[in-house]
Amino acid sequence: MQRMPVENIYRNTRKATEALCSPLSPEDYVPQLVEYASPPKWHLAHTTWFFEEMILKQQLPDYQVFDPQFGFLFNSYYNTIGERLARSARGDITRPDVESVYQYRDYVDEHMHKLMNTSLSPQVNELIILGINHEQQHQELLLTDLKFALGHNPLFPVYHKDANYLDNANTEEGRIQIDAGLYEVGHEEKGFHFDNECSRHKVYLNSFSIDKALVTNGEYLEFIEAGGYENFQYWLDDGWHWLQQNRIKAPLYWHKLDNTWHYYTLAGLQSVNPDAMLCHVSYYEACAFASYMSKRLPTEFEWEIASQYFLWGKRWEWTNSAYLPYPDYKISAGAVGEYNGKFMINQMVLRGASVATAPQHSRNTYRNFFLPHLQWQYSGIRLAQ
């Protein structure tokens, strides 16, 4: 990222976020169907608030906030900064309207460009790059959260005719054998990375093999038709409870119509492509399918070592690793320290990237993490043995 001037990267990132919203109608910016999926308007404002709160208020003399109430409305989870709106209430923000949020973005952009035309210290430059990566993360969340809202609309509306995002097929087959031994994992700390990717350290791995290909829709359909969702023996107890309580019968967005499976895509409702990589499954479903196949999910360290030998990047891949700190991990002081560390509990690690991920976030040390029951990301399965 550092090869291009930071101002250009900033400008391109901000434009990319707004381009994702270009197919939307005003009504699409507001709905929030579940607590964990935020409305597009909130994403537009929150990513802007990040630059205002974390950078402009501290670094630009005499900076005046755009609206004193926006700090309360668009803070996500930063306790250091103060009171904030409950996460579940983000869809309640009918005012400010969409136009006001875009005016907010323009206002902050104007002042950020003013700041970036001064002599920046290395620390401020790093903060700006963090803010850019933060917005790129929210670009993916904007797409997945929007799909959740549109995918629960009974009319299955089209976001964009070219936005299927589910038709990716495997181009490799077979398995990779990795010998037992001591390996190094984690980021080498050259170039941008998040703090949860460090420090680089050694792990011992027993010998294992791992599939080059991701599980396909056709393979998963066999699991469904074999009664996979009715047989408790494949499921973790917590997963079985989730399944029963929520009456889960298939991956998210799958619908059986006229005895044929369809799924909602951002290009509308389409027939399930049996050759495409499976998508929108939870960790529980991934574990159950692995059990059905008499295999398992790889650990995040196995995945990282093996990823040098297979193609990845179309689906976030569930691993069998809990989201925990690496050796010598230290939470930074201040609000920035709340970015990753405090979420290292009750979550599972996903590796790789997805079709919705910003290109700059596709590195094999990147550690994504979600609660094990969540399906709404572009998540898939790679099996190990």
Image (tube, rainbow, N blue to C red):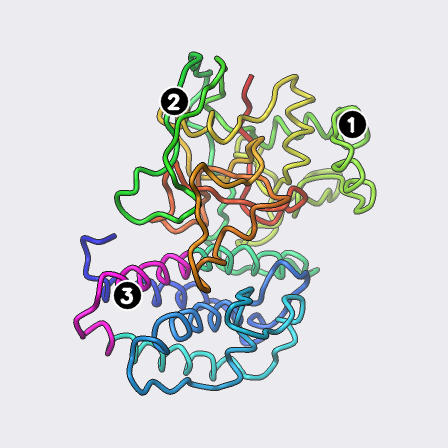
What residue do we see at 42% from left, 30% from top? Answer: 304
Q: Mark 2 is on which residue type?
A: Tyr
Q: Work out whether residue 69 or residue 345 is closer to the camera in this orientation and state it.
A: 345
Residue 46 percent across, percent down from the top left: 48, 70
Q: Is residue 228 magenta?
A: no
Residue picked out by circle 1 = 227
Which sits earlier in the primary sequence, circle 3 or circle 1?
A: 3
Q: Is residue 28 above or below residue 323?
A: below
Q: Mark 3 is on which residue type?
A: Val
Crowding near pointer 1: few (<14 within 10 Å), some, many (20+)? Answer: few
Q: CA distance from mark 2 to mark 3?
A: 35 Å
Q: Is residue 117 magenta?
A: yes
Q: Secondary structure at mark 2?
A: strand
Q: CA distance from mark 3 to mark 1?
A: 55 Å
Q: Nearer the viewer, mark 1 or mark 2?
A: 2
Q: Secondary structure at mark 1?
A: loop
Q: Is residue 106 left or right of residue 40?
A: left
Q: CA distance from mark 1 to mark 2?
A: 39 Å
Q: Is residue 180 left or right of residue 152?
A: left
Q: Where are the magenta residues, as a range? A: 114-136
Which sits earlier in the primary sequence, circle 1 or circle 2?
A: 2
Residue 204 percent across, percent down from the top left: 45, 20
Crowding near pointer 3: few (<14 within 10 Å), some, many (20+)? Answer: some
Q: Is residue 82 left or right of residue 120?
A: right
How would you classify the magenta stretch by its main secondary structure? helix
Crowding near pointer 2: few (<14 within 10 Å), some, many (20+)? Answer: some
Residue picked out by circle 3 = 124
Q: Is residue 227 left or right of residue 141?
A: right
Which sits earlier in the primary sequence, circle 2 or circle 3?
A: 3
Residue 133 percent across, percent down from the top left: 37, 57
What residue do we see at 57% from left, 57% from top? Answer: 147
